[in-house]
Amino acid sequence: MTTTAATHPFAGEELREQKIQHGIDPGDIAIGVVIGRTSEFFDFFVYAIASVLVFPRLIFPYVDPLTGTLYSFAIFALAFVARPFGTFLFMALDRHYGRSVKLMAAMFLLGSSTAAIAFLPGYATIGHSAALALIVFRIGQGIALGGAWDGLASLLALNAPKERRGWYAMIPQLGAPLGLIVASLLFAYFAGSLQPEDFFDWGWRYPFYCAFAINVVALFARLRIVATPEYEHLYESRDLQPTRIRDTIATHWRTIVIGAFAPLASFALFHMVTVFPLSWVFLFTLESPVRFLLIEAAAGAAGVGAIIASGIIADRIGRRSLLGVCAVGIAIFSIFAPFVLDGGPSGEMVFMLFGFILLGLSFGQSSGVVASGFQTHYRYTGSALTSDLAWMFGAGFAPLVALWLSVHFGLLASGIYLLSGALGTIVALWLNRELARHN
């Protein structure tokens, strides 16, 4: 590599020539992004499903199933609260020791926290210490997820052709439905093939073992990209380096706030069609959870198709326009969804299918929609903070709030909660447009 190439940012033809010289292509980055996000979401859904099927009985057998599920969802939310702290901690590690060290430490913490849950004793063995241990492991997962931010999604967007940025923006989002499909099928297999006593004794633990193995594979897939000199140079030349969080917030606090609320509709819908309906069906119907898990897996496949379609549509009408249209669609869906979900097995299938299609179209373009508003120097850290806050406000408490509202005020209340998320997205997109107009 010449001195000129090592000391000046790439642009235009120079960037294209450098890609050819080193074999750098957005498709290579996409592989690492999809594998990494799939592993993270698989961990996410394994825990979420266990929060409904396992933890109320294992950790909170001294309360009724509904209260136990609410307690489980409260612990579920702790990971989203812990994520910004993980970002703060691991950004400092990134600045001092490099991205590879940071990523290995974060993935080790994520894998060990997840594996530890697989060995978690129940209340019958260690009493209330079981809940305390689950809290510690869940917070560990959240801190690790904050640290697992690798900037590959931003690098992918920067190296994508301008006319195909919508297409490449949707690629990281594929990890969500893929992770859900694998997690749902694993739990459906063990819950359906084992006796209930065996499932609650040891069968539920196997998906957590698998999560640890998948994390190892994901770590090497990401390090394969992050640790190479060519990609390290791209990070440096594009200023995708960690900056102090205090400086980033001081410079771009408006962009961070807008970015946190822009995907509110899709992130709220995310849990309204995944975790919440599973809890409602499990608690208040006589249906087998295995059947509903299979429905979720099938709906997740429809979500994959919708995410892919979002990339095509966004490149034609624009990402913000698509998000705005989807927010309106989610608002309309929120009015009818409670009645559909309460319509028996056929209603549940319709709810899940339409919900996942709408989720795929919106979620496919929800990540980093305001990332271009960051100065390049602050984009890496700013994007991480925006993602953390968006998940915390949009998704972290959604299962807990939706279930509590539905129990006390009926399913329609959960629809109103989803409607508030859609309105939040519409306002944030409008503010983002006004901010861009005045800058």
Image: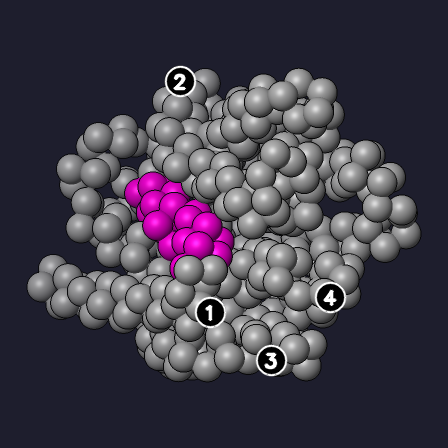
**Number of residue marks:** 4
Which residue lies under the disc numbered 3?
A: 343
Mark 2 and mark 1: span between their CA atoms?
50 Å
Which residue lies under the disc numbered 1?
A: 411
Mark 3 and mark 4: span between their CA atoms?
13 Å
Secondary element under disc 4, as helix, strand or loop, is loop
Q: Is residue 189 magenta?
A: no
The magenta segment: 382-405
Between disc 2 and disc 1, whose residue precedes?
A: 2
Q: Amino acid at mark 4?
A: Glu
Task: Tell me, for residue 96, which label it has, or none.
Answer: 2
Q: Nearer the viewer, residue 66 or 4?
A: 66
Which residue lies under the disc numbered 4?
A: 287
Between disc 3 and disc 1, whose residue precedes?
A: 3
Secondary element under disc 1, as helix, strand or loop, is helix
Secondary element under disc 2, as helix, strand or loop, is helix
Q: Are marks 3 and 1 in contact (CB under 8 Å)?
A: no
Mark 3 and mark 1: span between their CA atoms?
11 Å
Between disc 2 and disc 4, whose residue precedes?
A: 2
What residue is rendered at 25% in x and 48% in y? 256
Q: In terms of image quadrants, where is residue 215?
A: top right
- Density class for disc 2 (Cα within 10 Å; few <14, some 14-19, many ≥20) is few
Secondary element under disc 3, as helix, strand or loop, is loop
Q: Amino acid at mark 2?
A: His
Is 366 left, or right, of 171 in this rendering? Answer: left
Q: Nearer the viewer, residue 255 or 233?
A: 255
Does the rendering let one see residue 55? Answer: no
Residue 355 screen position, x and y as percent:
54, 73
Between disc 4 and disc 1, whose residue precedes?
A: 4
